[in-house]
Structures are given as structure tokens and as C-alpha cells.
Image: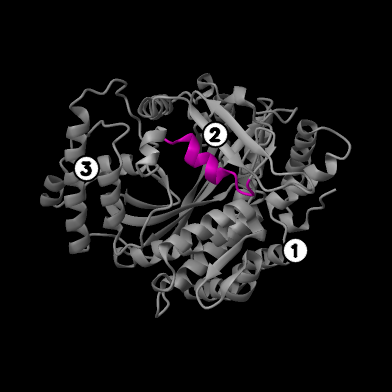
Amino acid sequence: MGKHVANQAFRPGDRQRYRDKMQRGLDALARMLAEGNFSFPHQQMGLEMELSLVDEAMNPSMSNAEVLEKIGDPSFTTELGQHNIEFNVPPRVLAGKGALELEEELRASLVDADAKAHDSGAKLVMIGTLPTLRSSHFDPRWLSRPPRYGLLNQQICAARGEEILLHMAGTPLGEHGQERLRSHAESILPTSACTSVQLHLQVAPEDFAAHWNAAQCLAGVQIAVGANSPFLLGKALWQETRVPLFQQATDSRPEELKNQGVRPRVWFGERWITSIFDLFEENVRYFPALMPEPEEEDPVAALDSGRAPNLSELRLHNGTVWRWNRPVYDLADGVPHLRVENRVLPSGPTVIDMLANAAFFYGAQRALAEQDRPLWTQLSFATAEENFYSGARHGMNARLYWPGLGWLPAHELVLRELLPLAHEGLRACGVSDAVRERHLGVLEQRCRARQTGADWQRDTVLALQEHTDRQTALVEMLRRYTALGAAGEPVHTWPSE
């Protein structure tokens, strides 16, 4: 979706031509997979982090253009809403002590960016959903300025043909009853409330299916022990409210198409795969193109000439199907490679918490991908999806199913089964003992304390509400959250009062 799309008025024939180009892209991809035309010199990791901007009153600061100009670093770029920015971290080798160096680099970059944002009266916040957002912040005028965002909004809203409906029921906060949200929006800007961390892992083509399947198995656990999005529009909702919010806010289906079983564009999936080709083929088969603007290149002709094709149509279309684990085809210096993009985790609360989440994902994924008897041969896809939604709704309190263990609490599953696997997987990746012990140690202590970012937010608001109203409590909670986040200690150590 970072691609510049210029066409604002697609003609009736554009979708057919675009579909034909995507099919040519699939033909080229199939040939490349069969012929082994991919680079894989070593396993690399990458990271993208989405951030929110707030003002002194902890309200959203619609100032990303000015803040980005102040920061002056191409690693920081726009996101959907004017109160969002994104930080793209250059890829690096997973092995060795690189993650410790990355920890220091991330801290330094974010501190510097935050200091420059202050010149615009803004502050950076790493959080899954910004609790001080209001419905007025979803007005289309708050879309970021690059035209692709307006075009995406126009296409989704036109396909849906009606206002976007946000409706969800939360988990009770303390002794209070279940809270419910029902709100309408005239744009896809509720998506801007969802700020995430995306983890990339470069893999060999023949290993892609195992790594993607493993990532799907882990998604429910990841979100349960990494939840950080409990509030939206003043309501206490899911522990990871990003999940239902993102699905509803980008839903291009009116109710009638939902009732027919048409697939949503924010999608867990529906089956285990045998190749990355399965996912790109599903994209083309199931989802209409939102921005059908083809490029000049013929991907099959490019292959015939000995050049790796850009597969521009497949890649742009892939950027408008928001799988929680997304396939990525990309080129570096003209050489193609494949990545798994893990989109499950929220932003924050701190750099060390995010790197602990990353270490767990990379390690456990590697270990599961290399097991003699793959886990996904013992776990139905429907159960993996059930785990995902249970983890998002209940966080640490979720009960998840795991083959050989049955149903057990998320924190217990991590401590008993998955943390040792994550250590094993990181060792297999060549990650140093110092990295393993530091980053996985943070995750272990979080599970023992049973305090995620979402737990801390909920507990803090509950305590503050004894003396004030919900909105004031949310503002004060966010003020404390930003201060504790800036101090950098992991969230399991944060006091809730």
C-alpha cells in the first residue's frame, strides 16, 4: 500500500484488465517457484512500527505532516490518519547479537523522533488503540494527505455502499457489566485507531508454507500475551480491540454479502497451505481489486528475458487483503525474495516489550516449522482461528487449545510449552544466549505476573474511576502510560495505581 496510485476514476474495463494482469503475475510466480529463482543468503528479520500522536491534553494530534517534516528521516512515514506515523526499521540478520543492538537503536530513534515531535506540540505514543479518540476524529478530512489513502477510502466505502458500522461487546471491567459499542463512521478512519507492530521474516520458498502455518498456529498465543488495545471510543471492549475494529472498519461487504459468506478483507484465512502460491491465488480468486491500475510490465515477458518481474499488480492487491499473517513477494537490488509478515501484535507498550514479543514469535515459529510432525497436522484450522479470537477477546485469561495439552490458560501454555520451544528455535537461528535470555526473559516474567499492556490499562482505569468519570480516567491513564513507556521498563513491572 506504500505504492503511489494516481487514478481517481477507474473505468469499467479496468478491473478486467487488472484481473488479467494479476493472472499473468500468478503464472510468473508459479514458474519462479518451480525454477527456484529466489534469493535466500541468510535469515533476515524486519520490523515496522505504527505510532500515534497526541497533544498536551492527550488528545489525538492531527499533525503527522508537520511532525514528519521535523523528524526529517525517511524511516518515518505517513499512515492512514493524520494522528498516525510509521517507523520502518531496515532488515537485519536474525542470528547473533543484532537484537540487542536493535534495542538500543530503536530507543535512540524514538527518543530523537519524540523530541522533534515536541516542536510541533505532539508526542509519540506506542499503543494498540488510542483511548482518547472520539467519533469526530473519524471524519474523512482527517485522512493523511497522500492520495492513496483517499482513494482507498473511496473504494471501500463505494463497495460497501453504506456507513461503516462498529459494533462489539467487551469483557466486564471489574464488577461492572459488559460494555457495548455501537457507532457509525463515514470513512475507514476507525482503522487509524489500530496501531500495530509488523514482524517480517525472510524465508526460503520451500520453507514458506511451514513458516506461515506455524505463524497461524501461534497467532492466538501471541495476541493473548501481547494484548495492548482494551479501550475504544470510551468503552472497555476486547483486550485486543484492534482485531474486531480492523475487520469492521475496512469491511467492504454490505450485510447481504456477509450473509452469503463472502470473505472479509481482514482475514485469518480458512486452510493450511502447501505453498505461498496458495495465498496469492486466493487473493486473486476471492477479492475484487480496490485500485485496479495496471503497470506496463508483462511479468511473463520479464521472466522470458531473464529478469525478475515486479509483480506490481499482485503486490498492490496483496496490500489490500489484510491477512493477520501476510505473504510478501519483494525485490532487493532486482533479486526476488519471500517473507512472512506477521501483523498480529499491537504497538507498545515499550521497546523491550515489543522485542520480547518478536523474540517469542521468531523462536517459536522456527521450532514449530521444523518439527518432525507438524503441529498443523494435529490442529484444525478452525481451532487455530478460535484460539486467535479467544486470545484477542480475553488476553491472558484466554483458554487456548493445544494438541497434546488440551485447553489451558494462555500464560500457562507459554510457560509450559512454548517458551522452551522459542528458546530452541532462537538457538537454531543462531541467536546469542544474551539475546534469548534478555528478551524471552521479559516475556516469561510478563506471563508470571499476568500483566500485559491491556491488563495494566484496564486496572489503572478501574482504580481511577473510583474518583472520577471514564473520560478523565482514560486521559490520566494515558498520561501515566506515556511516562512509564518513556522510562522504558517492561510493562509487567508497571504499578497500576
Q: Residue tagged by mark 1? A: 449
Amino acid carrying label 2: it is: Leu
The CA span between labels 3 and 1 is 49 Å
Amino acid carrying label 1: it is: Ala
* Within-10-Å neighbours for mark 3: few <14, some 14–19, many 20+: many
Q: Residue tagged by mark 2? A: 166
Please report the residue visible at 33 percent of the width from the left and 64 percent of the height from the top: 204
Please report the residue visible at 26 percent of the width from the left and 23 percent of the height from the top: 10
Residue at the outermost bottom position: 372
Q: Nearer the viewer, residue 406 or 59?
A: 406
Q: Where is residue 427 drawn, in percent x and y?
A: 52, 75
Query: In front of the other: label 2 or label 1?
Result: 2
Please report the residue visible at 51 percent of the width from the left and 31 percent of the height from the top: 165
Q: Nearer the viewer, residue 221 or 423?
A: 221
Q: Are marks 2 and 1 in contact (CB under 8 Å)?
A: no
Question: What's drawn in magenta, residue-wise?
Answer: 238-252
Q: Where is residue 319 drawn, in percent x and y?
A: 37, 41
Q: Where is residue 72 drawn, in percent x and y?
A: 54, 32
Q: Are marks 3 and 1 in contact (CB under 8 Å)?
A: no
Q: Where is residue 102 drawn, in percent x and y?
A: 57, 56
- Which comes before the other along the chain, label 3 or label 2? 3
Amino acid carrying label 3: it is: Met
